[in-house]
Amino acid sequence: MPARHPHINLFPHGISAGARLMIYVLFSIAIIIADVRYHALNLFRSSMNSLIYPISEIVQTPYLTYEKVTGFFVKHGQLQQENAALQQRFIAYSAKLQRYQDLEQENQHLRALLGAQSRTPLHAQIAEIIAIPRDPYLRQVTVNQGSKQGVHAGSAVIDEQGLIGQVTQVYERTSDVTLLINNDQSVPVAVQRTGQRAVLFGTGIDDTVEIRYLPHNTDVRAGDLIITSGIDGVYPSGLAVAKVMQIDLSSSRAFAHIICKPVAAIDRNRQVLIVDTPIAENAVGKIAGKP
Amino acid sequence: MVFNQAKGRSIQLSHSGRVITLSLVLALAFNLLPWSVDYLWLRPDFLLLVLLFWVIYQPARIGLGAAWILGLLIDLTDGSILGQHALAYAITVFALMLLQRRMYNFPPWQQTIHIIGLLLIEQTMSVVVATFVGDSFHALQYFAAILTGALCWIPVWTLLHSQRTPDAKKSQ
């Protein structure tokens, strides 16, 4: 006969599954609120991220090796063709560059005459997109440059055509870039043709951004180029952002409804440029935590 | 009569702990694979599939706690709202725990039908959380990942089922 238990065990299975679910649900809600409302978990996020980083690095290796190997076995003819095309582009660009240098000098000279502050040179570094989240709400990508490489939160991210987004979270070796089309991502812009200042908002829809809060009588036409105005001190001025596609002036709206299409190939690139200006650094200090 | 002791082995330990851990790590790695942007909406959630498999066949070891922690891990790797997938995973696994007895005895193709429902619960919960937080929902194609996920169930099942311990293989 087995020995009798000194106590009768009333709950041999512990807490019921339903109760445990309740605990986990409440805990999740608490974390969601702490993260979204108070941004209290950024430190936890970045420290955990550097723990997970090796896994994603290992996962990328086969793909990167494949790219390297296929890159090695390129046809001679293809290389030649590419080389010729690049050379042609180089010539075209160098002609433009000469003009640009001349113009920049002239601009500096004129600014000096006017007594205006001279433009700060851009500092850019190349980064590669290494991950895209598996979630349609998140218009963001992860790039392979982090605080170790001198990336700051708030820097603008561009490709060869225009603005892609902004660095919003910097980890040790990677950083998260929120795309222009992310819901409510806002960029201070100007219409290139008229100089009209405005604010451009992401809509969360692919290839669509909109300009809000411009009155009906504003001079904006379809096809106008929208550039960054640079007055916020976060984005450098003069980067191409979007092209105006469609303008809805119906009087049922308080403001003109201007729909634009980003000029950058937002979801097509692998290489991007992270741009920051010396001004941006000061400005980021002021708006830290609210990129 | 002794009631506080099980008559036989109540739940068979059909897989070694090492296999479980390794499969979960591999599934997480699969989730982190670079994926073409054009087909991003088709990407199935391998981690969830593997997790569901273990909840069906090893419910004593993998349950709500594991689901919650793995969900949090997904939030960290995706950079989404912390707790969004943790909540969704926990609720999905709870739903599966209600079905566990019958899922255990189903053949894989019949499980697939239930898996569709479970994946739908997960997607819907994460959409609900995102909506409460203030995002607006546009892409109905988001739910396409449910179907690709369900298609992956039978391969995942076959792979994991083949990793049973020799003891478990003999007894069946």
Image (spheres, coloured by chain):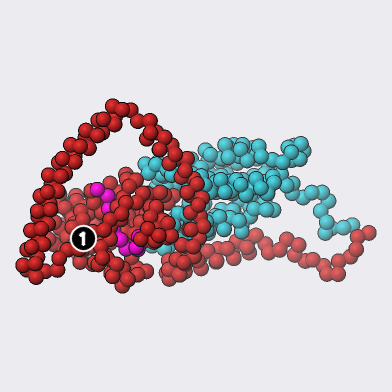
Chain colours: A red, B cyan
- Quadrant in which the C terminus of chain B appears: top right
In percent of width and height, residue A224 lies at: 14, 52
Q: Is residue B49 visible?
A: no
Q: Residue at x 33, y 28 (%)?
A: A75
In percent of width and height, residue B138 lies at: 36, 51
* Front one among A7 and B124: A7
Binning the other alpha carbons within 10 Å of mark 1 as few (below 14), some (14 to 19) or many (20 upward) gives few
Give left or right: position of B158 versus B86. Answer: right
Q: Chain of mark 1?
A: A
Q: Quadrant of residue A186?
A: bottom left
Q: Residue at x 69, y 40 (%)?
A: B164
Element type at mark 1: loop
* Front one among A12 and A99: A99
Q: Which residues are magenta?
A: A151-160
- Quadrant in which the N terminus of chain B appears: bottom right
Principal SS element in the magenta part? loop
Give left or right: position of A121 versus B55. Answer: left
In the displayed structure, A231 sits above or below B19; it is: below
Give left or right: position of A2 versus A17. Answer: right
Q: Is residue A55 magenta?
A: no
In the displayed structure, B70 sits above or below A283; it is: above
Give left or right: position of B110 versus A211. Answer: right
Report the residue that reaches farthest toward the bottom: A286
Q: Amino acid type of disc 1?
A: Pro
In percent of width and height, residue B3 lies at: 84, 58
Residue, disc 1: A121
Q: Residue at x 50, y 46 (%)?
A: A58
Q: Residue at x 21, y 56 (%)?
A: A239
